[in-house]
Amino acid sequence: MDIKKYLPFLQWLPHYDKTYLKGDLSAGITVGIMLIPQGMAYAMLAGLEPIHGLYAVTIPLILYAIFGSSRQLAVGPVAMVSLLTAAGISSLGPASPEEYLLYALTLAFLVGLVQFSMGALRLGFVVNFLSHPVINGFTSAAAIIIGLSQIKHLFKINLPNSEHIQEMIVAIYQNIGDLHWLTFGIGLLGIVIIKFGKKIHPSLPAPLLAVVVGIVLVWGFGLTERGVKIVGDVPSGLPGFSLPSFDISGWSTLLPIALTISLVGFAESFAVAKTIQAKHKNYRLDANQELMALGIANFGAAFFRGYPVTGGFSRTAVNNQAGAKTTMASIISAALILLTLLFFTGLFYYLPSAILAAVVLVAVAGLIDFKEPVNLWKKDKTDFSMLIATFLITLTLGIETGIIAGMVLSLLVVIYRASRPHMARLGRVPGTKIYRNIRRFSNLEVNENLLIVRIDGPIYFANVEYIRDKMNQWLLDRKQPTKMIIFNMESVTSMDSTGAHALHDWIMDWRAGGIDVCITGTKGPIRDVLDKWNLIECVGADHVFIDDHSATAYFEQSMDNDHMEQLAPYALQSNVEKK
């Protein structure tokens, strides 16, 4: 057993380069500073005391750093999971804050159990339905939504908590007259520092510099008295040990919301991790390990007074933007929060919310991809449509709906393409034994009484009707009567029982209509299927050939029998035992 597969931090820790420390330290501190107000705000959104949001970004963050395969993913509370937590627990009608917290701990435990079990059972394949266009559309739309959500901090205006762009734009339009210019100026200064700080020196921790400048300005000039909103008091205290409820009846009530959080949280987390990993490519993501790592992180939240966590979109973007090279950045973030809870809460009292908004805005702006839609429009209209659909659904219906819709769209495209395999009519290259697609190449030799067809893909229940309809159309379009069909099956990868029955029916129908049938180029597994379903007997052993040239020679009677018999075993041999 390869222990590094289950403890991914062992892949980078023994080879940790000291040059990584600058980026990890800058990212860890920056994200740690972000996590303090974010954790508090998201906990309140979940209906909990603010302190539990900070607890949720300590132990869970460290656990993910040990078990997670992404080196930039920042784990902790996120808006959507917080909203789902509040909605799920509120419907149970808890009688007291203590009971509410117990439900939250139990929910975190169940989410951890579901995710860890999925990972252990190798169910991470569900993310295979997140194609590149879907991830691209989702990421760009989510970046816009999160960016717009920071406008209330940048402008200091009242905006509703929403993930629907139409509601956000209307609210911004209605409240833009209340813009607080001093707050906006500080936020704009933060954006400039973060955006152009790296150009001064590549190692300059620009986000951290913006945080320091913001604190100094507010503290030095007394800007709180002029209306600039700050983080204010940060609660203190380390997370104590806690126990979720193990009451089965309570589990059954919380399980539906736990399943929802598990799937939505993982889909969102993996989509973000995959987007960021594509920019580095010096490590590989493992979907199953990610599931187990998120599950373990949620166990940590359950036993250390937190609530459900997952990979955060904006924090991961900031983590990457600030230079994170490994999950050491997450450990530094967690250590900073623990130290802050113990000793340094006062240092962040004057941190303006507009600076945090600036950090998020610059980070997510880099995730909006304008080039890929244009590229897909030119090269692949289907993928372009999938990208735009995911983009629009995410923008208008919310992040969780967008990612689920993207997965469904990906699945539908897979089914559509699988149900319409590529089929080609073949002709012979003059003077050779090579056959090519007559639509792609001119001057091929084509016998008007012979139809040679190649199917590129499996023959199974989803595409047999398409194949039959295509064959019938080609037979109708021919000017000369077809005397033989040669089925080139060199590109057929599999055949199920429906495909076998359909092929038998086609052979019988065509022969009843006076058209003979031959089969060529079958791979071993396909020959086994043909033999198992008695299709060799149906078509006739003397009608199964090693290649199109041999079948054509048989039709044209241009090859001697001895040579035919010499090649026959290579066309017919299978591993099916005869009874």
Image (cartoon, rainbow, N blue to C red):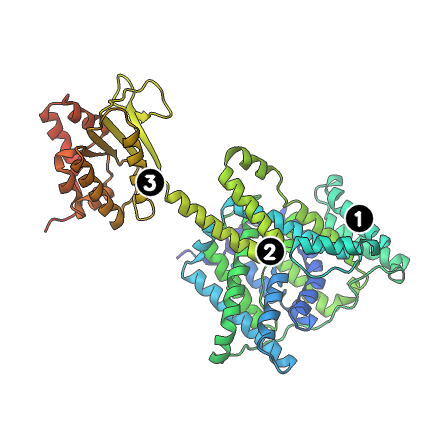
Disc 1 residue type?
Answer: Leu
Q: Residue 239: where, in percent of width, then height? A: 64, 72
Q: Earlier in the sequence, mark 2 or mark 3?
A: 2
Query: Circle 2 sits on which residue?
Result: 397
Q: Earlier in the sequence, mark 2 or mark 1?
A: 1
Query: Circle 3 sits on which residue?
Result: 457
Secondary element type, mark 3: loop
Q: Nearer the viewer, residue 453 or 188?
A: 453
Q: Earlier in the sequence, mark 3 or mark 1?
A: 1
Question: In the rendered image of this protein, does residue 58 appear above or below residue 558?
Answer: below
In-image side of 312 versus 465 (left or right): right
Distance Cα–Cα, label 2 vs label 3: 37 Å
The answer to whether the residue labelled 2 contacts the one labelled 3, judged by CB atoms less than 8 Å apart, is: no
Q: Nearer the viewer, residue 372 or 556?
A: 556
The reply to whether residue 487 is in sight is: yes
Q: Which numbered disc covers residue 188?
A: 1
Q: Nearer the viewer, residue 279 or 488?
A: 488
Disc 3 residue type?
Answer: Gly
At x 28%, y 27%, the residue is 478
Quarter assignment of residue 494:
top left
The reply to whether residue 323 is in sight is: no
Secondary element type, mark 2: helix
Q: Nearer the viewer, residue 99 or 174?
A: 174
Quarter assignment of residue 119:
bottom left
